[in-house]
Image (spheres, rainbow, N blue to C red):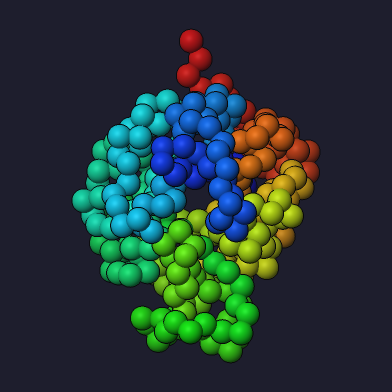
Amino acid sequence: MLTKRIIPCLDVDKGRVVKGVSFVDLRDAGDPAELASLYDREGADELVFLDITASADARAIMVEMVQRVSERLFIPFTVGGGLRSIEDIRQVLKAGADKASLNTAAVQDPALVREAARSFGGANIVVAIDARRVHGGSSVQAGDPSLALGTDSRWEVYTHGGRRPTGTDAVKWAMRVAELGAGEILLTSMDCDGHAQGYDLELTRAVAEAVPVPVIASGGAGTLEHLRQALVEGKADAVLAASIFHYGQYRISEAKAYLHQHGIPVRPVAVHGAA
C-alpha cells in the first residue's frame, strides 16, 4: 500500500512565510529557509513553497529565495507562484525545486501544462487549484465552454492568489489538467483555508474520484483528526498543512504517529541532514 504524505506549506509574501484565513488577513509565521530546515529535520515527506502574491502582482517568483530554501532541504520540494512559461519553470527547477506548481498561468493557457509535462516530465508538474463553493453562480464566463460552471457545479476555480473568479468548474478543470499531463493536483478549499475546522472533504473526494493522479488536500487543517479525515474520507493521497505546524500546535512526528495509530500507512520519521 502506498504511504500517505504530510506536506507543510510555506506561503511566502515579501520574503516571509505568512498564513491567513480564506486567503486574507495574513500574519507572519517566520523565515522560509529556517522553517524549511525545521520541517526537513522533523520528518516531513515534502515541502511546498508558494509565492502567493507573484501572480496578483504580475511579477516573477523570487528565484534567489527558492535557491536559499532548497539548500536547506533533503526532501522533495515543490515551488509555485508566478510561473508563466517553460523558462520560468526551468529556472525554479534549476534553483533546486523538484516540482513546479502552476495555477493562474495554467488557467490562462492550458497548453502550458502539456508543454511543461513534455519538457520536464509529468511527475514534476503540479497544478494547484484554488476552489470556492458556488453560491448563486458566477458572472465570469470560462474560456473553454466545456469547463464552464453548470447548474450542477459545486465549486469554482479562482486565480491570482484567490482574487479572481474564473467561471470554471473545479472538478472539470482537475480532470482537464490530468489529461494534459499534470502529475499531481494541489487542491485548496478557499472556504476552509485557515479556519482550522477541517478540510472540505466533499470537494477533495469529488476531485480524487475524478482524476487518475495524486491529489493533495489543502485548506482547513486544525487537528490531527482532520488529516486522517482528508486521507480516508476525502480520499486524498497527501495532506498539506500550514498553521498547525508553523505555530507549534503539532509536530510532524505527532501527525505521523497519529495516522499510524489509525491504520494509515506513513513513512517513518527520519532525521535529515544530521551532522
Count of labels shown? 0
Q: Can residue 190 be seen in this view?
A: yes
Q: Which residue sits furthest top?
A: 275
The x, y position of residue 137, in whole percent, is: 56, 84
Q: In this view, does 53 lie to the left or right of 87?
A: right
The x, y position of residue 212, in whole percent, is: 50, 64
* Towards the viewer: 207 or 27: 27
184 up-or-down from 247: above or below: below
The x, y position of residue 9, in whole percent, is: 53, 43
Q: Is residue 147 left or right of residue 256?
A: left
* Towards the viewer: 179 or 131: 131
The x, y position of residue 149, in whole percent, is: 51, 83
Residue at 56% from the left image edge and 36% from the top image edge: 29
Q: In this view, does 110 lie to the left or right of 38?
A: left
213 up-or-down from 1: above or below: below
Residue at 78% from the left image edge and 43% from the top image edge: 262
Q: Is residue 236 visible?
A: no
Q: Which residue sits furthest left?
A: 87
